[in-house]
Amino acid sequence: MNALEFGDFDVFLANSGKECLSHLKEVLEIWRSADAVCFDVDSTVCVDEGIDELADFCGAGKAVAEWTAKAMSGSVPFEDALAARLSLFNPSLSQLQDFLEKRPPRY
């Protein structure tokens, strides 16, 4: 078994080339110092495309789904599509809470 299977990153790093070692140390430092880490798990870990479901709940489902299709096809940068989708319905905190209560994520 290699050292990574035991979580011994120092052994792994010590056995890597200098360039790889430098890069991996930098990556580990970023992970260790991050205040938060976000992952997009829509349509992977959970079944639904979350923003489309929330938009539908708030009455803007069709327009937002069109932007989602553009983003997924690569014809629009992700950040632009996300901003456009959110601007179409601008959900409040109470809408988010109500949505999560009535339509919890499906896995």
Image: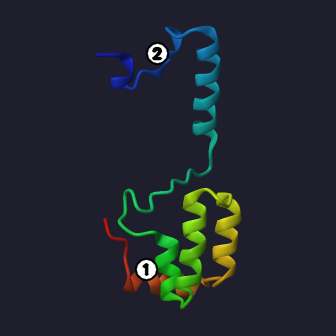
Q: Residue at x 69, y 70 (%)?
A: 83
Q: Residue at x 64, y 18 (%)?
A: 22
Mark 2: few, some, or many residues within 10 Å (few <14, many ≥20)? Answer: some
> Which type of secondary structure does the marked residue at label 2 adopt?
helix
Report, in whole angstroms, how far the alpha carbon at label 1 lies from the one at label 2: 42 Å
* Position of residue 71 in the picture relative to residue 107 (left or right): right
Instruction: Identify the image quadrant of the N terminus.
Output: top left
First of labels 1, 2 by sequence position: 2
Secondary element type, mark 1: helix
- The image quarter in which residue 77 lies: bottom right
**Amino acid beneath label 1:** Leu
| Residue 53, image x, y percentages | 46, 78
Which residue in the structure is indicated by mark 1?
100
Q: Position of residue 36 (x, y in %)?
A: 59, 52
Q: Is 43 left or right of 61, judged from the image as shown?
A: left
The residue at which mark 2 appears reads as: 12
Q: Classify 31 as above or below 68.
A: above
Question: Residue drawn at (59%, 82%), measured in percent from left and top?
Answer: 63
Q: What residue sits 65% from the left and 76% below the top?
A: 86
Q: Three-letter amino acid code at disc 2?
A: Phe
Q: Kindly indicate whether the residue at mark 2 contacts the one at mark 1 (C-beta within 8 angstroms).
A: no
